[in-house]
Image (tube, rainbow, N blue to C red):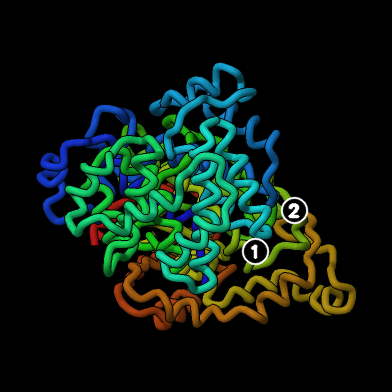
Amino acid sequence: MTRNYFQAALVADALSLGSHWVYNQGKLARLYPDGVTALTDPGSSYHPKRKAGQLTHYGDQMVLLKNSLENGTYDDAKWAADWVKGMTGYDGYLDGASKETLASDGASASSSNDLAGASRLAPILDLKLSPTEKIAAARAQTSLTHGDAGVVDSAEFFVRAVLAVEEGASFQEAFQSAASEGNYAQLKTSDHLDTAIAAGPDYLAVGTEMGLTCHTPEAFPLALYLTLREGATYATAMSENALAGGDTSARAMLIALLFEARDGNSGTDLIDQIQIGKTTANPGSNPIEIEGSNGRLAGVLEMPEGEPVAFAIFAHCFTCGKDFVPGVRISKGLAAEGIATLRIDFSGLGQSGGKFEDSSFLTNIDDLLAGAQWLRENFKAPELLIGHSLGGAVALSAAGRIKSVKAVVTIGAPADPAHVTHLFEDHLSEIQESGKADVKLAGRNFVVGQKFLTDLEDHSHPEDLANLSGIQILIMHSPTDDVVPLENAGKIYSALRHPKSFISLAGADHLLLKEADAQYVVDTIKLWTTRALSK
């Protein structure tokens, strides 16, 4: 079973935003008559700058921790520095623990006994560390901001419980072993567990009786109780926790870890709706950087005036890069129509890292997926992919891997990605014999490596096309395209299921070098997506 603790806790925090610090259970019942199953705007006044799909200050700090662990290890000094940097000038709610810790620049923790300090620990569970190392890291990350021993003990307890569930223990068995095996200075684990086990079936009444505040003596046993309820699932526990009210987020983020340990795939139905991070963008061109699986990626996010109607990614043609004029015109044109559009240099091109000889069709797909992930984490998951030439094939192959995508537009795309090898067919033998070759493409010199050929052989493009069920596809192609002949559009169209459409770019060249042709593409995409993205 594959587990993603960060994702489970991320969704838990976002689900809690609406009910966070609302203590009136009657109000929550009126707001959520069918339970809490969707991401909603805050119901209290504590998060005025947040909206549905965003996080509380607990979730935002968990994101800071995840980013601090980018090298796969936990480091006290790095975490302290990253936390202070991330929370300085923070635009969300600053609780007392954060204020006190910031006042000392991270040198000393607050005396707060809020369970929130422990609730950030999810990213540590995703690391490939030993149980002892995970426990130590969880305690250390908590103690940066929360000096109360009970809060730090809580972090150890939940790590131990999660690891026990991973080994097959029931929740109650996991809690009992965590209570008996941990080294707790202050937390009365056995007493809290006994309280949770003995509590009655009315979770609203139990919540009121135990206490709904942030404080660990109240939040800790209530989190155990909500997890132990008969027949509980991730979804039911999240809903009941939210309807109980109070400090819903800290409890939810820890409860989520236990269900992820037992069941996996927690929150996957909502993950694409979540916006995380502090990235902001102004109308116009916004240079950005993305950490992709193949290295650093340089990009530009074109933002419209006002709220975007959708987010899109533009995939450029073979060797073109994000600054190639037609791609710039199309992405800027779409932004002018309200569609925020990200274009990136694929690995080894333009300002992105890596060597071109190490890139391939598959690394292009990885780069597009990294762009989609970046949009999801910072703004909103993309609903539209647009690909020019080989970028069209990349977009078609990536679309089935991005849950949020509703529509794909291809422009002059080849039916088979291997089509591009005709551009350097005189060098194929040299590449196969020497592992690479210097070739001239569009007047520029590139080193094409064996990886490009190998990945094409290993990739099944027809299978990708067959998996695009339910995604709207618009194929745009010029009848006079002398680089990728029109017959390619026919092959793509035949391989796809409906819904699919074809638009002729009569008179246009393959690279869309005429501004009028690029504008026609923009106008057509805007008109087509008005319907396609509404489905």
Whether residue 49 sits left or right of residue 142 in the image: it is: left
Give coordinates of residue 122: x percent, y percent: 51, 51
Residue at image mark 1: 363
Let me know if residue 334 appears in the view: no
Separation (CA) of disc 1 from disc 2: 11 Å
Q: Is the residue marked by circle 1 packed among few (<14), some (14-19), or many (20+) residues within 10 Å?
A: many
Q: Nearest the camera: 420 or 449?
A: 449
Task: Name the image quarter holding the C terminus.
Answer: bottom left
Residue found 32% across the figure and 33% down from its top: 306
Q: Quadrant of residue 528?
A: bottom left
Residue at image mark 2: 354
The three-letter code of the residue at mark 1 reads Thr
Whether residue 19 sits left or right of residue 94 in the image: it is: left
In the rendered image of this protein, does residue 365 appear above or below residue 199?
below
In the rendered image of this protein, does residue 466 appear above or below residue 87?
below
| Residue that lies at the very extreme toward the right in this rendered image | 434
Q: Nearest the camera: 185 or 425?
A: 185
